[in-house]
Image (cartoon, grey):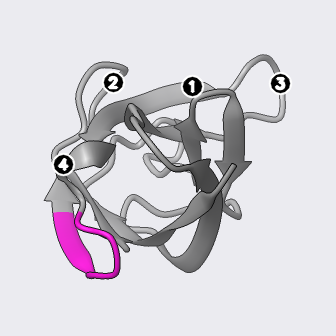
Amino acid sequence: LSFVMLRVRIFSARNLLGADLGGSSDAYVVLQVAERKQKSKVKRGTCHPNWYEYKDFPLPSGPIGELSVTVKDRDFLGSDDIIGTTVVDIPTIIPGEEHIHVYALEGGEAGENLSTLLS
């Protein structure tokens, strides 16, 4: 079985919903491909977080589905809130090339956008 590497760089988000009492969020990103999940660090007290993190997903060669991206607000009591989500169709990514995308978040309580680099 051969593998390809999907590298996702999470840049930033802008104008996220202020999900906490003070009007800000403690935002983090959950990336998921098939059953594999990876999380970013939590950026506390901001609606404009900058992560600048890389996450690598080794994927089997052949048909690959989607990259699910969920932005959440970390809560100390209760479950974390979903701020928004987006889905990236992995087959549209050309192996070996970098693709910079800005995604509008949907659902949850929404946010404006999330910038990522896929390669």
Mark 3 or 2: in front is 2
Q: Which residue is mark 1?
A: 81
Instruction: Spot the residue most to the front.
Output: 1
The answer to whether the residue labelled 3 contacts the one labelled 1, judged by CB atoms less than 8 Å apart, is no
Q: Are marks 1 and 2 in contact (CB under 8 Å)?
A: yes
Front of the two marks 3 and 1: 1
Q: Main secondary structure of the magenta part?
A: loop
Category of crowding for the residue at label 3, using alpha-carbon neighbours closer than 10 angstroms: few (below 14), some (14–19), many (at least 20): few
Q: Could you tell me which residue is drawn at 73 percent across and 34 percent down?
A: 75
In the image, is residue 41 above or below residue 67? below
Decide whether residue 35 is among the magenta residues: no
- The residue at which mark 3 appears reads as 77
Residue appearing at x 38%, y 34% in the figure? 66
Callouts 4 and 2 close, C-beta under 8 Å: no
Q: Residue at x 69, y 49 (%)?
A: 1
Magenta stretch bounds: 94-101
User: In this image, 55 relative to 10: left or right?
Assistant: right
Q: Is residue 98 magenta?
A: yes
Closer-to-camera residue (110/101): 101
CA–CA distance in space, label 3 to label 4: 26 Å
Q: Which kind of residue does numbered mark 2 sit on?
A: Glu
**Label 2: element kind:** loop
Looking at the image, residue 106 lies above or below residue 79:
below
Mark 2 lies on residue: 109
What kind of residue is marked 4? Answer: Glu
Q: Earlier in the sequence, mark 4 or mark 1?
A: 1
Q: Residues within 10 Å of mark 2 (few under 14, many from 20)?
A: some
Could you say whether the residue bearing mark 1 is in a helix, strand or loop? strand
Q: Which residue is mark 4?
A: 112
Inter-mark Cα distance, 1 to 2: 8 Å
Q: Residue at x 62, y 67 (%)?
A: 55
